């Protein structure tokens, strides 16, 4: 509004424009005075200017995906005492906003001829400790060179991505590679449950044999049920919104793989997650083990 008055004041005059816009001319002149001498700004305006710069920095540092709620929590973690409505107002001033998720695309094609383990999870996708319940799934990304498939293995205690793989092929080997990465990284005990949907890759002989060799208990959801692997679907919704839709279109599989690597590192170590109390997955696991060590020492 101020810029509009400045642009047209030589032709129409300040007072007539202000009369039409229903603002006081003194407001316009006060704004000009602050532009000439920033020290004349109010305390609130000075604080807003400081917060805008820090808010933009924190937003940029977090993949430029945070909305008002996450950005508010991130700023409070850095010591800024401000209301969420202030974050919303300043985000509008800056012209930034959080990403929005798109609609779900079907990637699971069940093979009814394959034997299927029972569902050991029953939609309870929150473990009470790390390496108790993993969920696995994959999605696809369209590139100029064709489709790229991305598989995740997620520890449900803190939603940490413990294994992943990007591939030009959706054969069993690429989801098996994600599982191998998770097994190497975590060294889980034999009581761990591995849950997936009924995709043929996860019911294949190679995959089920590897689960058995590692001592993992297989669990599979039902066909046509949007909740059978809900946590994995949620994670892929975030991945698509924060990486694929935001940074695309994609020229190559290598570009998808590189940005997925960056996102997984950020997600595990710096992204704040609402379900675990607006901390990072790594912080949640570290807090769990620190508490366990304390209990062991007391015992």
Image (cartoon, helix red, strand yellow):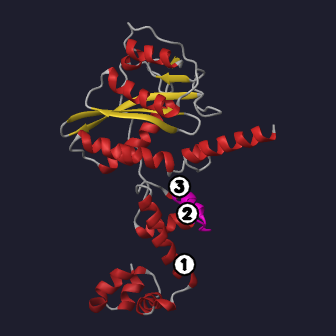
As measured in the structure, the alpha-carbon distance from the residue carrying label 1 to the one carrying label 2 is: 14 Å
Per the rendered image, the range of residues in magenta is 70-85
Mark number, residue 70: 3
Side (left or right) of 1 relative to 183: left
Side (left or right) of 48 relative to 97: right
Query: Residue 177: where, in percent of width, then height?
Result: 37, 27
Height in image: 219 above or below 30? above
Mark number, residue 47: 1
Q: Residue at x 37, y 12 (%)?
A: 111
Could you say whether the residue bearing mark 2 is in a helix, strand or loop?
helix
| Residue that badge 2 annotates | 75
Among the 4 quarters of the image, the one containing residue 57: bottom left
Could you say whether the residue bearing mark 1 is in a helix, strand or loop?
helix
Height in image: 280 above or below 143? below
Query: Residue 169: where, in percent of width, then height?
Result: 26, 27
Q: Which of these two is toward me, 37 or 27?
A: 37
Q: Which of these two is toward me, 124 or 15?
A: 124
Among the 4 quarters of the image, the one containing residue 64: bottom left
Q: Earlier in the sequence, mark 1 or mark 2?
A: 1
Q: Earlier in the sequence, mark 3 or mark 2?
A: 3
Residue extending furthest right? 299
Residues tagged 3 and 2 counted as in contact (Cβ below 8 A): no
Choose mark 3 or mark 2, whichever is in front. 2
Q: Which of these two is toward me, 63 or 164?
A: 164
């Amino acid at each position: 509004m101020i810029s509009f008055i400045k642009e047209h004041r030589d032709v129409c005059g300040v007072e007539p424009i202000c009369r039409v816009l229903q603002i006081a001319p003194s407001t316009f002149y006060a704004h000009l005075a602050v532009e000439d001498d920033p020290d004349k700004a109010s305390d609130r305006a000075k604080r807003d200017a400081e917060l805008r710069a820090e808010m933009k920095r924190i937003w940029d540092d977090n993949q430029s995906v945070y909305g008002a709620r996450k950005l508010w929590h991130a700023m409070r973690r850095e010591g800024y005492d401000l209301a969420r409505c202030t974050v919303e107002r300043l985000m509008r001033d800056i012209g930034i906003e959080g990403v929005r998720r798109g609609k779900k695309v079907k990637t699971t094609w069940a093979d009814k001829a394959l034997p299927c383990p029972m569902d050991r999870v029953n939609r309870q996708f929150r473990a009470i400790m790390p390496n108790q319940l993993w969920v696995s799934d994959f999605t696809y990304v369209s590139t100029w060179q064709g489709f790229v498939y991305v598989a995740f293995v997620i520890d449900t205690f803190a939603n940490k991505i413990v294994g992943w793989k990007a591939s030009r092929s959706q054969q069993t080997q690429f989801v098996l590679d994600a599982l191998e990465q998770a097994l190497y990284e975590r060294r889980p005990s034999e009581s761990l449950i591995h849950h997936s949907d009924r995709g043929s890759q996860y019911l294949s002989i190679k995959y089920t044999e590897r689960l058995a060799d590692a001592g993992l208990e297989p669990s599979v959801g039902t066909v046509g049920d949007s909740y059978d692997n809900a946590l994995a679907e949620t994670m892929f919704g975030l991945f698509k919104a924060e990486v694929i839709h935001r940074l695309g279109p994609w020229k190559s599989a290598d570009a998808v793989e590189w940005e997925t690597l960056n996102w997984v590192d950020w997600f595990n170590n710096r992204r704040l997650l609402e379900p675990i109390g607006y901390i990072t997955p790594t912080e949640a696991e570290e807090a769990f083990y620190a508490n366990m060590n304390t209990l062991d020492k007391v015992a």
